[in-house]
Image (cartoon, helix red, strand yellow):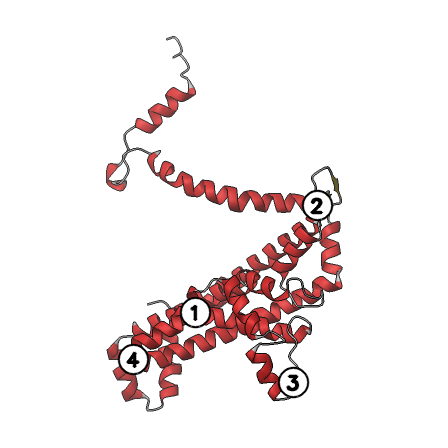
Amino acid sequence: MPDAPRRSLSARLSDWYFAETPNPAKRVQFSRPLTPWIFLLPQLAIVVIFFYWPSVQAVTSSFYIEDPFGFGSTFVGFENYTDAVTNSQYASTAWFTALFCVVVTALSLGLGLLLAVKADKVIRGAETYKTLLISVYAIAPPVAGLIGMMFFDMHMGPFTKLFAAFGYDLRVGIDYWDTAFALTVIAVWKQIPYNFIFFLSGLQSVPVSVREAALIDARSGWRRFKDIILPLLAPTAFFLLVINITYTMFDTFSIIDVIVKDKPANNPMTLVYKVCLDGFKGNDIGGSSAQSVILMIVVAALTVVQFRFLERRVHYG
């Protein structure tokens, strides 16, 4: 029997697309196997172009010393990584980022939960109270940084005058720890409404029967909250923990840029801001790429720790 003629690639793709599904009962939404991939293609293209491709480029650039104008590059291996981890400025920036992340996350979650608990008890004027608390979240981070800078201005800022009344000269933009204090206050103020929204939704989803049973079992309000309400909020708290860490490490970039931009070089900054500073202002493409790869590894490790160890304490349902 003679061999069947080889079909073209386009013909085989056409047969595959128009082929009937072997088991239609399991795929009732799409009658053609290529259809779901067509719908996914725009999102996959965005992920590849704006996430995976820049990541690959960053890893590649981290092994080179590149001309900032693109005229050439020299392979240096792990030299950029060695320079980053042995640099005293990078180490101090890493320590500040860790401290900033812990303080902002703890204060944002704690104050957001406190305000949500208080809002859950409000009866008269509840909508106005909630709207005032949530409205801050509508402010963009650069605008929040600008508003914060006005409050901490050395010449006319009300916070500066308040500290001066107690005999302290607050110098935001010049003194390291004064600037760190201002960054923390603005970052916490910007993030509290987000936590408030989710904590309030979690509190309002607690069944009335559970609250009534808690009133019978425990007379102390703190004990009822600690032993009954707080465990029910564990999934919400875990979600917000991940979001707040991500916010502190990445989304505070605009706030930091407004506060420390065009200021003396001894001001605090996070690792993300240092990557931008070294790459775009210092023209150190290879060094900033190495720093970004280190930051990606740190974030991946934090994600693994959070989901591997902390999520075990979270009970859903």
The reply to whether callout 4 and callout 1 are in contact (CB within 8 Å) is no
Instruction: State the CA–CA distance, disc 4 to disc 2.
Output: 60 Å
Give residue 100's position: percent from left, percent from top.
59, 70
Local crowd size for mark 3, using a 10 Å CA cut-off: few (<14), some (14–19), many (≥20): few
What residue is shown with label 1? Answer: 136
Distance in Å between CA atoms under marks 4 and 3: 38 Å
Identified at 25% across, 40% down, the residue is 28
* x then y, percent, for residue 10: 40, 21
Image position of 147 (left or right of 16) = right
**Residue located beneath label 2 in the image:** 63
The residue furthest top is 2
Characterize the local packing of mark 2: few (<14), some (14-19) or many (20 or more) Cα atoms within 10 angstroms. many
Residue occupying image coordinates x 75% and y 60%: 86
Instruction: Name the residue type under label 4.
Output: Gly
Task: Kindly report the distance in space between the C-alpha atoms of the residues bearing marks 1 and 2.
Answer: 43 Å
Q: In which quarter of the image is the N terminus?
A: top left
Q: Which residue is drawn at 60% across and 75% down?
A: 181
Q: Tell us which disc is closer to us: 2 or 3.
A: 3
Of the residues under marks 4 and 2, which one precedes in the sequence? 2
- Left or right relative to 125: residue 73: right
Q: Looking at the picture, which amino acid does disc 1 mark? A: Val
Q: How far apart are marks 4 and 1 (CA)?
A: 18 Å
* Secondary structure beneath label 2: loop
Name the outermost residue toward the bottom: 219
Answer with the quarter of the image where residue 87 lies: bottom right
At label 2, the amino acid type is Phe
Q: Which mark is residue 125?
A: 4
Query: Who comes first in sequence, dot 4 or dot 3?
Result: 4
Along the viewing direction, whichever of 315 and 223 lies nearer the viewer? 223
Residue pointed to by mark 3: 168
Tell me the mark number nearer the camera, choosing from 1 and 2.
1
Asked if disc 2 and disc 3 are in contact, CB closer than 8 Å, the reply is no
